[in-house]
Amino acid sequence: MVGGLSGRNIHIWNQAAVDNLAWRIHTLQESLWVNTNYSIKEDYEHSLANQHKVRWRHLVWNRISIPKTRFVFWLIARQGLKTKEKLFQLGVVVDHSCPLCGLQPETHRHLFYNCSFSRLCVEAVKSWIGISLKPITHMNFRNRRLSKTKQQVLTSIFTCTFYHIWKCRNKAV
Ligand SMILES: [Zn+2]
């Protein structure tokens, strides 16, 4: 198609628009700090401690990841999802228990790092791709033997995993 939007162009435009939007939001709120050493756990801990340094941008915002999954992951890392614990604190809900296991308050940390359901999912994915990472640091890719591309592929796999955990959670609510 000449002069119009073909399917491929629309896909590229959508991806660019999501990236651009996320980038604008991100740069407005935070200073970016780029480092090729990548640890989701550390980034998560930084986020919890309100230390505004985000180091996973280059691995998460790549061409391999599916835009909606990396956006959800970005929200997870920023604790931006409307978990029941957040809604409970706002007085929107009276029950803040995790809809997947029912054992703990549904915080980001619990839902994606400590929940028995999530752990099972992550372990299944790890088993499927044949990698062994520390149980809690699901995405600790500090292993420098991995090329950047392999790190991006692994990141994409786990952003997908986290995205589907969030989808399961939404179905369970
Ligand atoms: Zn749970």
Image: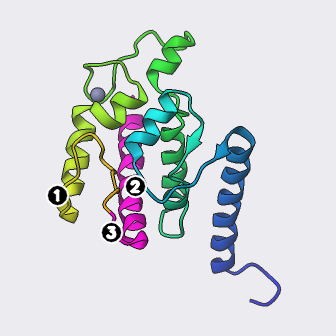
Mark 1 residue's CB less than 8 Å from ligand 1: no
Q: How is the image coloured?
A: rainbow
Is 119 displayed left or right of 108 in the figure? left
Which comes sooner in the sequence, label 1 or label 2? 1
Q: Nearer the N terminus, badge 3 or badge 1?
A: 1
Q: Is residue 164 magenta?
A: yes
Return the disc, 3 or 2, that comes first in the chain's sequence. 3
Task: Look at the numbered disc 2 and give the secondary structure of its residue.
Answer: helix
Give the percent coordinates (x, y) of residue 104.
29, 19
User: Callout 1: helix, strand or loop?
Assistant: helix
Q: Secondary structure at mark 3?
A: loop
Question: Residue 160 — which label?
Answer: 2
Q: Is residue 171 magenta?
A: yes
User: Identity of the amino acid at label 2?
Assistant: Cys
Q: Which mark is residue 127?
A: 1
| Residue at image point 38% right, 23% down | 106
Q: Nearer the viewer, mark 1 or mark 2?
A: 1
Decide if residue 3 is on the left or right side of residue 118: right
Q: Which residue is mark 3?
A: 146
Label 1: few (<14), some (14–19) or many (≥20) C-alpha neighbours in 10 Å:
few
Q: From mark 3 to mark 1, how far is it between C-alphas? A: 18 Å
The part of the chain drawn in magenta is 144-173
Give the crowd class for mark 3: few <14, some 14-19, many >=20 residues within 10 Å: few
Q: Quadrant of the N terminus?
A: bottom right
* Identity of the residue drawn at 49% across and 62% down: 66
